[in-house]
């Protein structure tokens, strides 16, 4: 009896370790494996014996993977080509379509993921070969429609991958990243709900960080169908094994005592260690997750993992730089005991006014930053001028007026806080246009600078200075009220008066 020929896979990569690992794995799985170090070697192998599928890296010496794919397409369209790359780009993705590539994997690729891809490719190849035989008997229009449908499906899949990359490209905080992961999971798979859990060896149980319902609904973190020890155990198992898990119509779901009909759990790993697990669920009986859903969610968590590292690095840099700048401000205030803690108080007062005016969380964060650093530019002013107890000369005052520009330049040079630098630069502008450094007036002055101006003036008058004692609250309030429309924005003054009327600034004055 004739032995059936094993399906043959050709792996092309210039890294021998990858060839060794993949070769050993797929031989163990029952496939015949051939290897080549670049495109030219691959063509020699293809010319010597039949090949059923080809996996190729893109960047290789001599002939790269895209050139190889085009050569295979021109000479034998029945051989499916899967491209692997560690540097995905829209240009490479579009190039693979033109070269007839059937799939696009992002390195590092898990062997289990490659095996799923191989199974899918061979299923599609079998259908493709049958279609080649049938194509001789059907009209050209039907053939074109079938090819077009396949192309549309591939383009749709690539669009999903590009959308995932776009979704995570501009995320700047861990909280935003976890929320985006759950929203994207629901959007991509059509899940009824998605949740993200943080896992750690130091935690006894997974900690839920974000949750999103169908249609992007903001649901409570405890408002989904799965709860309890069974789910916690399942999440920990997936995190420990580091392999996506798909559960449908199984006894495991009945063990969870949940109405969920289909469940997928995908680990988010950084350097081979699980940071968290993304959980998506279908409740309806006719809704099930597919291998393609698992693939897309795995691709998404890989992208998210890279962003987690970038966000952590950014947050660490941000905190360190802010601490350094705050130290500069303390150095300035240490030169003058009368202004000690002035910057912190200005920041706190600005927040009170901002909240009264309905500022967003982002705007309040900017006010906190700009308030604490608004006088950092005084580090560039000589002590003889900065600490002078008497009246300044016109020339000396002109030097003092340079400190907003100096401060804005210091902050702006770091490239992280452009908007904050703008607020610092204009906190001494006047509503009537007679301020400095640019003489802006009315709404041309940044709104947050107008808030900071009132907060700065309040603390300057309500605290001791080298040239005078602090003023009582009633006098300070009268001066600010009278300055509405001239020195200060009337809208900000109105907010100030409301805060004073509630007694919220009495504490600041006493302190």
Image (cartoon, rainbow, N blue to C red):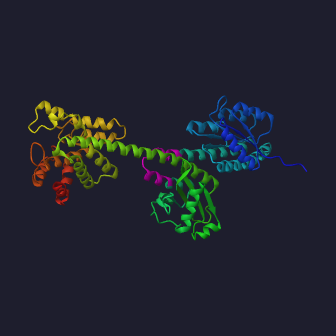
In the image, 305: left or right of 79?
left
Q: Position of residue 177 (x, y in %)?
A: 46, 51
Q: Is residue 281 visible?
A: no
Identify the image quadrant of residue 453: top left
User: How many numbered badges does the structure rendering display?
Assistant: 0
- Of 463 and 161, nearer the camera is 463
- Of 346 and 363, nearer the camera is 346
| Residue most extreme to the right | 1
Q: Main secondary structure of the magenta part?
A: helix
Q: Position of residue 413 (x, y in %)?
A: 34, 35
Q: Position of residue 219 (x, y in %)?
A: 46, 62
| Residue most extreme to the top | 62
Q: Quadrant of the C terminus?
A: bottom left
Q: Position of residue 447 (x, y in %)?
A: 26, 45
- Of 275 and 220, nearer the camera is 275
Q: Is residue 195 visible?
A: yes
- Find out whether residue 118 is within the magenta segment: no
In the image, 15: left or right of 486?
right
In the image, 314: left or right of 461?
right
In the image, residue 439 above or below residue 145:
above
**Over which residues does the magenta segment extend?**
163-181
Residue at screen point 76% across, 34% down = 45
Residue at screen point 17% across, 49% down = 458
Identify the image quadrant of residue 52: top right
Residue at screen point 67% across, 45% down = 150
């Amino acid at each position: 009896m004739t032995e059936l020929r094993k399906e043959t896979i050709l792996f092309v990569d210039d890294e021998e370790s990858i060839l060794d690992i993949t070769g050993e794995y797929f031989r163990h799985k029952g496939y015949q494996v051939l290897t080549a170090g670049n495109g030219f070697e691959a063509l020699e192998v293809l010319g010597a014996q039949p090949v059923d599928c080809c996996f190729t890296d893109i960047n290789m010496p001599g002939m790269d993977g895209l050139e190889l794919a085009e050569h295979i397409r021109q000479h034998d369209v029945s051989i499916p080509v899967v491209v692997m790359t560690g540097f995905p780009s829209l240009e490479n993705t579009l190039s693979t379509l033109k070269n007839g590539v059937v799939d696009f994997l992002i390195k590092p690729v898990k062997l289990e993921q490659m095996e799923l891809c191989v199974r899918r490719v061979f299923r599609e190849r079998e259908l493709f070969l049958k279609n080649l035989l049938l194509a001789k008997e059907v009209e050209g229009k039907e053939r074109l429609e079938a090819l077009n449908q396949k192309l549309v499906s591939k383009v749709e899949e690539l669009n999903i991958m590009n959308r995932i990359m776009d979704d995570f490209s501009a995320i700047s905080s861990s909280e935003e990243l976890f929320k985006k992961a759950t929203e994207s999971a629901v959007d991509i798979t059509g899940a009824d709900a998605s949740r993200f859990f943080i896992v750690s060896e130091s935690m006894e149980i997974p900690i839920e960080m974000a949750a999103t319902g169908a249609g992007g609904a903001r649901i409570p973190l405890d408002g989904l169908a799965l709860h309890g020890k069974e789910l916690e155990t399942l999440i920990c198992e997936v995190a420990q094994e580091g392999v996506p898990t798909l559960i449908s119509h199984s006894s495991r779901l009945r063990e969870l005592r949940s109405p969920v009909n289909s469940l997928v759990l995908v680990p988010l790993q950084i350097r081979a260690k699980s940071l968290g697990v993304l959980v998506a669920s279908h409740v309806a009986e006719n809704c099930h997750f597919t291998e393609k859903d698992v693939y897309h969610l795995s691709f998404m968590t890989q992208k998210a993992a890279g962003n987690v590292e970038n966000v952590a690095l950014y947050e660490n840099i941000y905190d360190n730089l802010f601490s350094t700048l705050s130290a500069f401000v303390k150095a300035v205030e240490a030169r003058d005991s009368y202004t000690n803690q002035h910057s912190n108080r200005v920041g706190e007062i600005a927040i009170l006014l901002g909240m009264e005016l309905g500022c967003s969380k982002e705007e309040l964060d900017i006010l906190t930053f700009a308030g604490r650093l608004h006088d950092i530019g005084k580090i560039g002013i000589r002590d003889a001028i900065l600490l002078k107890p008497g009246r300044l000369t016109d020339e000396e005052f002109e030097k003092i007026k340079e400190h907003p520009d100096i401060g804005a330049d210091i902050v702006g040079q770091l490239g992280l806080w452009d908007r904050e630098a703008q607020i610092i630069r204009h906190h001494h502008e006047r509503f009537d246009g007679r301020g400095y450094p640019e003489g802006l007036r009315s709404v041309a002055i940044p709104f947050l600078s107008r808030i900071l101006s009132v907060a700065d003036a309040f603390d300057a008058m309500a605290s001791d200075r080298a040239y005078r004692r602090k003023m009582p609250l009633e006098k300070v309030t009268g001066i600010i009220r009278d300055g509405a429309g001239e020195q200060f924005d009337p809208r900000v003054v109105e907010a100030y008066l409301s805060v004073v009327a509630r007694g919220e600034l009495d504490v600041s004055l006493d302190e």
